[in-house]
Image (cartoon, grey):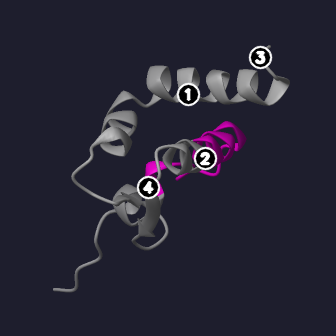
Amino acid sequence: MVTELALRESALISAIEQQLPEFARMCRDPGSPLVVMHQDAFAADYQDVEYKLLGMAIKFAGICNKEVRIIGRNRLTVDGPTTSQ
């Protein structure tokens, strides 16, 4: 008998594989114990749906026994680097 928890986990895995295939591939790579992402990879413009997707991605990484490391400063990739001339 499949439990509700198993069904939810299966739905999470399916959603990440469909929406974030490269992230899923990185999580399944046996060559590294961690996945590194820039914080602007999700919700750079503060979208609620992206917050949910980030949480799902973190849970997926955990299912794959990966540590998630988030790097970078807020909106760095969106606003671009600041330079003085």
Residue at the image point whose x is 44% and y is 55% from the top: 66
Bin the neighbour count of mark 2 within 10 Å (Cα to Cα): few under 14, some 14-19, many 20 and up.
some
Which marked residue is nearer to the observer: mark 3 or mark 1?
Answer: 3
* Secondary structure type for disc 1: helix
Q: Alpha-carbon neighbours of circle 4 within 10 Å: few (<14), some, or many (≥20)?
A: many
User: Tag 1 or tag 4, which sits nearer the N-term?
Assistant: 1
Residue wearing tag 2: 59
Find residue 2 and name its label. Answer: 3
Closer to the chain start, of discs 3 and 2, is 3
Residue positioned most to the bottom = 85
The first of marks 4 and 2 along the sequence is 2
Amino acid of disc 3: Val
Instruction: State the separation of the CA atoms marked 3 and 1.
Output: 16 Å
Q: Amino acid at mark 4?
A: Lys
Q: Residue at x 27, y 43 (%)?
A: 29
**Secondary structure under the numbered disc 4 in the rendered image:** loop
Residues shaded magenta: 40-56
